Image: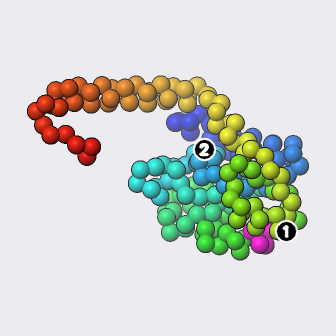
Amino acid sequence: DKAVGKNTNQKVKIIIKNLKKNKVDLHFVSDPENVAWLLNIRGKDSPYSPIPNCRLLLGVNGKKTFFCNKNKIDKFFVKKFKDMTFVDESLIEVFFNKLKGKKIMIDKSKLSIFFKDLLKKNNSIIEQIDPINFLKSIKNKTEIKNSEKSHLLDGVALTKFIFWLEKNYRKKRITEI
């Protein structure tokens, strides 16, 4: 919360309000970046990216179902989200086949045809751009302050590198590595 200025519950409430307004039962968040933003989480799936490999199904009642490789999450994470159901990504097809008669919002620009076909088999789908995309673009004071801080640190690192490069490019053999 200190890093982003808004906690998960505040963000989820905004999405639920949107679901109610659109008379939708469920929102399938298929973009892992949007799941990360909504839950204020970072992943360790890839050594060079903080984006977790996951998906989320959010109900108008606030129920959250988190799809991921369950071997990659620890007890602390599960304890932090004790109100969330965790489903192994290998079982997502089985889980979706059990959904029936629901009105499900999907992101028409990012959802795979596999998931779209799976969800619309027994449900009606509402295709629109994920509202999380718009919410991510609105920055609060904390996010602006931290963005400025990170740009300053990046600028210092780049300046140090350029200084080192100017000092050493004729003295040492420098490669991309």
Residue visible at 38% across and 30% down in the picture: 154
Instruction: Indicate the quadrant containing the N terminus: top left, top right, bottom left or bottom right.
Output: top right
Residue lying farthest to the left in this orientation: 171
Residue highlighted by disc 1: 122
Where 89 sits versus 130, above or below? below
Q: In this view, does 38 lie to the left or right of 125?
A: left
Residue visible at 61% across and 29% down in the picture: 139
Where is residue 169, by image quadrant? Answer: top left
- For this rendering, which residue is in front, 126 or 148? 126
The magenta stretch spans which residues?
Answer: 96-100
Q: Where is residue 9 in the image (x, y as percent from the top left)?
A: 68, 45
Between the C-alphas of marks 2 and 1, the distance is 29 Å
* Badge 2 or badge 1: first in the primary sequence: 2
Dot 1, crowdedness within 10 Å: few (<14), some or many (≥20)? some
Disc 2 marks a residue whose amino acid type is Trp
Q: In this view, does 26 lie to the left or right of 81?
A: right
Q: Is residue 20 left or right of residue 70?
A: right
Residue 81 visible here: yes
Q: Position of residue 166 (x, y in %)?
A: 20, 26
Residue highlighted by disc 2: 37
